[in-house]
């Protein structure tokens, strides 16, 4: 799940990003509304949710939310603000926000709000994904494989490996290019070479193979990579 976080308080922004990263979210964090708008207009990046602070330099979170909705973008928006008057809440919701979180708040509540959005929004992925012998459980942030005898095994993955496998599982049997993977799974501010992508895939493939998955991620030279939904060992 890729999140656009727009928060101009350095300590709070860093804390939110750290917490979300620990729960397998990929986070692009920016500190003003104008830069956030540029990120949203980047056609090569698809966000699952935006977390917007109300008071931002450049363009306020409220105005940014209005622009998102004016363009017909159904992206779920969680608004963060210290404004707790009923009139402010109504203004935020009328601007197109899907939920509203008052500062100060606990990180547990933030995560719960995101899970609630996930349950009710068609823009979010389901609570589980299943491809072949692999299943992904979002509630536990874990990947489980099933061997030939039906026994299930939790696969220990790094955050990046989890995000990579999630992306493949959302596009089973499809060829994904290195550029697509790099654009979707690395922060815009980060520089990820094709070698980094290939190295991550090799590490992920090794863990999947060790867990009993036969030919889980296929390399198609000159084209990209593909997650096979069937087990060729059958």
Image: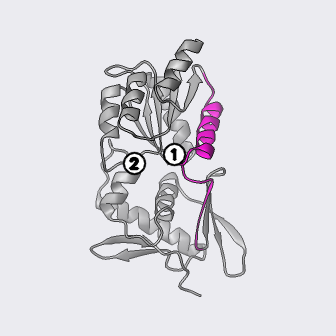
For marks 2 and 1, give the CA distance. 13 Å
The crowding category of the residue bearing disc 1, from other C-alpha atoms within 10 Å (few below 14, some 14 to 19, many at least 20), is many
Residue 164 is inside the magenta segment: no
Q: Are marks 2 and 1 in contact (CB under 8 Å)?
A: no
Q: Is residue 160 left or right of residue 199?
A: right
Q: Quickly name the residue at label 2.
A: 46
Label 2 vs label 1, nearer the camera: 2
Seen at 59% across and 88% down, the residue is 234
Q: Which residue is mark 1?
A: 25
Residue at position x 34%, y 76% in the image: 220
Identify the secondary structure beneath mark 1: loop
Q: Categorize mark 2 by other alpha carbons within 10 Å: few (<14), some (14-19), many (20+).
A: some
Give how far across and how far down residue 204 sits, in percent.
Answer: 49, 65
Can you see residue 98? yes
Does label 2 or label 1 sit earlier along the sequence? 1
Seen at 35% across and 32% down, the residue is: 36
Q: Is residue 83 visible from the viewing direction of this image?
A: no
Residue 185 at what x, y percent from top left? 40, 52
> Along the horizontal axis of the image, is 65 left or right of 59?
right
Percent position (x, y) of residue 210? 57, 74
- Above or below for 55 versus 45: above
């Amino acid at each position: 799940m890729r999140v656009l976080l727009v928060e101009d308080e350095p300590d709070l922004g860093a804390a939110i990003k750290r917490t979300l990263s620990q729960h397998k979210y990929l986070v692009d964090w920016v500190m003003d509304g104008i830069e956030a708008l540029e990120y949203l207009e980047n056609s090569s990046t698809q966000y699952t949710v935006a977390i917007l602070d109300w008071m931002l330099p450049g363009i306020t979170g409220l105005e940014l939310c209005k622009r998102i909705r004016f363009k017909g973008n159904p992206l779920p928006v969680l608004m963060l603000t210290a404004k707790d008057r009923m009139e402010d809440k109504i203004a935020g919701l009328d601007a197109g926000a899907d939920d509203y979180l008052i500062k100060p708040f606990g990180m547990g509540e933030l995560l719960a709000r995101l899970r609630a959005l996930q349950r009710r929004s068609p823009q979010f992925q389901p609570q589980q994904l299943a491809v072949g012998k692999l299943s992904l459980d979002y509630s536990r942030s874990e990947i489980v494989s099933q061997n030939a005898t039906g026994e299930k095994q939790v696969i220990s993955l790094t955050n990046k490996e989890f995000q990579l496998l999630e992306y493949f599982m959302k596009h089973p049997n499809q060829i994904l290019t290195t550029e697509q993977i790099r654009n979707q799974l690395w922060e815009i501010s980060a520089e990820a070479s094709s070698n980094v992508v290939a190295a991550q895939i090799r590490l992920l493939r090794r863990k999947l193979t060790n867990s009993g998955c036969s030919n889980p991620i296929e390399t198609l030279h000159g084209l990209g990579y593909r997650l096979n939904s069937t087990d060729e060992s059958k």
